[in-house]
Image (tube, rainbow, N blue to C red):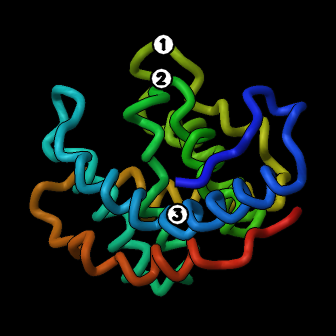
Amino acid sequence: MEQVKFTQMKDGNKEDYLLLDKHEKKFQEGTADRLIKFMNGLNSTLEGYKINRLEHSLQTATRALNDKADDEMIVAALLHDIGDELAPLNHSEYAAAVLKPYVSEKTRWIVEKHGEFQMYYYVHHLGGNRNQREKYKGHKYYEDTINFCENWDQKSFDPNFKSLSLKEFEPIVKKIFSRKPYSY
């Protein structure tokens, strides 16, 4: 396998970085496949829930699809909680960072903020402020984020809901992650 000549990045030359760029582009092309593989592994959950994380994600995405959301939002609904495994205290920001190059500013913002907006449904039972999301009132995506949470996320913990399979979402995941990256 061809490798760079340097051991410190500052010593690399154009040839080294062209080689790395070629490999990085190839690696980026596999992002959708890696995400789908990761999603397949979400068959466990925190204790106490009636369904696992994969099923929650599938239910959320199926509800978005059923409501005729666009492909980008369906993929965002599918991937909105991918941060739960590695970043449980900031899972929303993690998921938004993964999606950011491939989705609009609106979709990224909804995913990034959904964790705070979801608190509306439960945090008051734990002594917290259920209206924490009000600090975003007036933001152009405020209502969209409320709708994401109300219509798709918060109701997707139902063991009797008939969701689509991950395999059925693969084509739109691949479509979204094959886009030219956004720059905003």
Q: Residue at x 43, y 74 (%)?
A: 64
Mark 3, Cα crowd under 10 Å, few <14 / some 14-19 / many 20+, is: many
Mark 3 or mark 2, which is nearer to you? 3
Q: Is residue 5 above or below residue 149?
A: above
> Residue 89 placed where, x, y %?
51, 24
Give left or right: position of 49 versus 95: left
Q: Can residue 146 be seen in this view?
A: yes
In this rendering, the answer to whether 133 lies above or below 69 is above
Inspect the image, locate mark 3, and give the three-letter code of the amino acid beneath it.
Ala
Q: In which quarter of the image is the C terminus?
A: bottom right
What separation in Å lies between label 3 and label 2 (alpha carbons)?
27 Å
Residue 145 visible, this angle: no
Q: Where is residue 68 in the image (x, y as percent from the top left)?
A: 47, 86
In the figure, 1 relative to 36: above or below? above
Picture disc at residue 124: 2
Tag 3 residue: 76
Residue 148 is tagged as: none
Is the C-beta separation of discs 2 and 1 under 8 Å? yes
The tag on residue 127 is 1
Cα gap from disc 2 to disc 1, whole angstroms: 5 Å
For badge 1, the amino acid type reads: Gly
Q: In which quarter of the image is residue 61?
A: bottom left
Residue lying at 77% horizontally and 63% vertically, measured from the top left: 105
Residue pictured at 85% horizontal, 40% vertical: 12
